Amino acid sequence: MTFILGRNGWPVSIGPDSQMSLEVIDRHSEALFEFLWCPVCGHEIFSHIPFEGVFCKNCNTQVELQESRETRGYEEAVLACFDTHSTWNLHVDEKLRRDLPDGSARVKILGAPGAYEVDWWSPAPGDDWQPVERGEFDEVDEPADISHLA
């Protein structure tokens, strides 16, 4: 495949090229994604759209994973950066979603498959903001008149 940069700066395929190939590197383990949850809606399922990013399957909040410079001896140290610029219905129903401070937040995760833990959040949770806990809104149904606004 041959790729050129499109209008928005993302690679666009323009056809096969025998000189070029695309290698996919799985930088993060599947276990990390099993540990991760969305701090906006509390769901744990993410979708990867090639050349666009990773998004919460429930609310479309984007997450970008970065390797941390500091591991403190752990097998993995990852920064998960969440951004609500693409989140669905954030402005409509705060009983199902909680916005992030200034639309973004980061969490540092340390550990290894089966033994991950949260080291810190930025900004730190406090009176002004708390990340949605894993499954916090599982028992709340989305009103029928909301879903069409996505």
Image: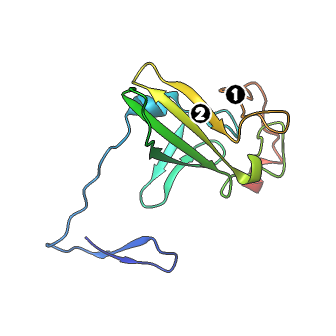
Asked whether, in this view, residue 78 is left or right of residue 131, the answer is: left
Name the amino acid type tagged 1: Glu
- Image coordinates for residue 79, horizontal then vertical, percent: 51, 41
Q: Is residue 148 above or below residue 67?
A: below
Q: Name the residue located 39 percent from the left edge and 73 percent from the top edge.
A: 12
Asked which secondary structure carries label 2, the reply is loop
Q: Are marks 1 and 2 in contact (CB under 8 Å)?
A: yes
Which image quadrant: the N terminus?
bottom left
Q: Name the residue located 22 percent from the left edge and 73 percent from the top edge.
A: 16
- Image coordinates for residue 52, horizontal then vertical, percent: 48, 60
Asked whether, in this view, residue 124 is left or right of residue 75, the answer is: right
Q: Look at mark 2 in the image and give the residue it sits on.
A: 37
Q: Look at mark 1 in the image and give the residue it sits on.
A: 133
Density class for disc 1 (Cα within 10 Å; few <14, some 14-19, many ≥20) is some
Density class for disc 2 (Cα within 10 Å; few <14, some 14-19, many ≥20) is some
Q: Is residue 20 above or below residue 60?
A: below
Sequence-earlier tag: 1 or 2: 2
Asked whether, in this view, residue 137 is left or right of residue 28, the answer is: right
Q: Residue furthest top?
A: 115
